[in-house]
């Protein structure tokens, strides 16, 4: 019995492949801009989210930035060991630990924001302003519509 040949498909025409490549490029640009601060994109997302919502718990952070609980735990551990984040016992529920930025974490975040914005600008540089708006609109549509298919869906869907 002859096996049929798989179809010849150009992976460069596949959205998933190009999304993966854009992610690689995005991380590379982010690390070029923020490398001296020693912060990763996920660590930045965690710091910025906690800064925006001081006192949130780790489970809520995980759901907000679309990470699984164990990965988030490792991120929080690293940020805490660097003195950028603290876990504090909640006054309302002694079993709950709230996340807050330290003064050092706030300072690092303040230094990171301009570099992060430069990275975003660099990523979108090939597009016109109109194309950027349309790209972001379509990107958000894809992410939000397909959120349920994620291994760690975000509850921060807009």
Image (spheres, rainbow, N blue to C red):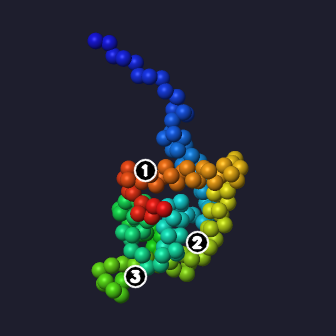
- 95, above or below 64, in the image: below
Residue highlighted by disc 2: 109
Secondary element at image label 1: helix
Name the side, left or right, on which 111 lies relative to 45.
right
- 94, above or below 64, in the image: below
Mark 1 or 2: in front is 1
Q: Quadrant of the N terminus?
A: top left
User: Which residue shows up at 41% across the image and 22% down it?
Assistant: 6
Q: Along the polypeptide, which appears first: circle 3 or circle 1?
A: 3
Q: What label does residue 146 carry, if any?
A: 1
Name the side, left or right, on which 54 lies relative to 4.
right
Q: Is residue 84 visible?
A: no
Residue highlighted by disc 3: 88
User: Which residue shows up at 49% across the image and 27% down it?
Assistant: 9
Mark 3 or 1: in front is 1
Secondary element at image label 2: helix
Q: Tell me where residue 150 appears, x and y as whole percent.
A: 39, 52
Q: Dots 1 and 2: beta carbons under 8 Å?
A: no
Q: Along the polypeptide, which appears first: circle 3 or circle 2?
A: 3
User: Which residue shows up at 47% across the image and 78% down it?
Assistant: 54
């Amino acid at each position: 019995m002859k096996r049929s040949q798989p179809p010849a498909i150009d992976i460069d025409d596949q959205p998933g492949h190009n999304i993966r490549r854009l992610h690689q490029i995005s991380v590379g640009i982010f690390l070029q801009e923020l490398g001296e601060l020693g912060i990763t994109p996920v660590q930045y997302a965690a710091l910025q989210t906690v800064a925006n919502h001081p006192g949130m718990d780790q489970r809520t952070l995980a759901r907000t930035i679309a990470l699984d609980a164990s990965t988030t735990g490792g991120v929080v551990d690293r940020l805490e060991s660097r003195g950028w984040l603290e876990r504090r016992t909640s006054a309302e529920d002694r079993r709950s630990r709230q996340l807050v930025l330290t003064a050092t974490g706030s300072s690092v975040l303040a230094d990171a924001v301009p570099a992060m914005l430069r990275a975003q600008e660099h990523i979108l540089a090939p597009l016109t302003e109109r194309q950027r708006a349309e790209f972001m609109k379509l990107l958000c549509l894809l992410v939000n519509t397909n959120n349920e298919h994620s291994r760690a869906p975000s509850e921060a869907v807009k």
